[in-house]
Amino acid sequence: MGVKRYELNEAQWQRIAPLLPGKVGDPGRSAADNRLFVNGVLWVLRSGAFWQHLPERYGKWKSVHARFSRWAKAGVWERVFAELIKDRDNQYLMLDTTLVRVLQQAACGKGGPGIRLWGVPEVV
């Protein structure tokens, strides 16, 4: 069976799996579904869809979003990205200019600069 749209292939998964929490020996509960979870997050981020539109095969959207937020607050995503950018042969590094534009506008906005976590809903 091939890799579904937006999902990690086996080589990509093997590269990041050791960087993620929930391995045997890590404090807390072991995570048997890390790959499914990461693929669900990638589906939302790559498709641009709302969390509520996450396909059911990835689990309940509220649970996936809550776990995504916990990992973001714990610095998991930053550690993964920091490790991945060490590879000078990385052919998949890209910068989404919509993020640059948003951050540029936010820096000049009322109330000063703020940090916005990916996929975390804004408080209005």
Image (cartoon, helix red, strand yellow):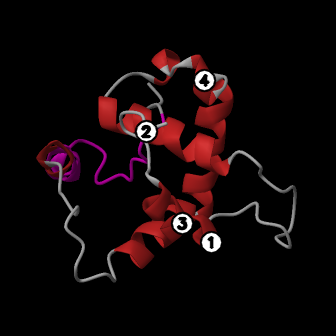
CA gap between label 3 and label 4 equals: 21 Å
Circles 2 and 4 in contact, beta carbons < 8 Å:
no
Q: Name the residue carrying label 1.
A: 18
Q: Earlier in the sequence, mark 3 or mark 4?
A: 3
Q: Earlier in the sequence, mark 1 or mark 2?
A: 2
Q: Name the residue carrying label 4.
A: 57
- Whether residue 94 appears in this view of the structure is yes
The x, y position of residue 2, in whole percent, is 43, 38
Q: Amino acid at mark 4?
A: Arg
Range of residues picked out in magenta: 102-120
CA gap between label 2 and label 4 equals: 16 Å
Mark 4 crowd level (few <14, some 14–19, many ≥20, 10 Å Cα) = few
Who's the residue at 51% across and 17% down the image?
52
User: Does residue 87 sit above or below 23 in this rendering?
Assistant: below
Q: Amino acid at mark 2?
A: Gly
The x, y position of residue 36, in whole percent, is 61, 41
Q: Name the residue carrying label 3.
A: 14
Q: Is residue 53 magenta?
A: no
Q: Name the residue carrying label 2.
A: 2
CA gap between label 1 and label 2 equals: 23 Å
Of helix, strand and loop, which one carries label 2?
Answer: loop
Mark 1 crowd level (few <14, some 14–19, many ≥20, 10 Å Cα) = few
The x, y position of residue 41, in whole percent, is 49, 40
Give the overall secondary structure of the magenta segment: loop
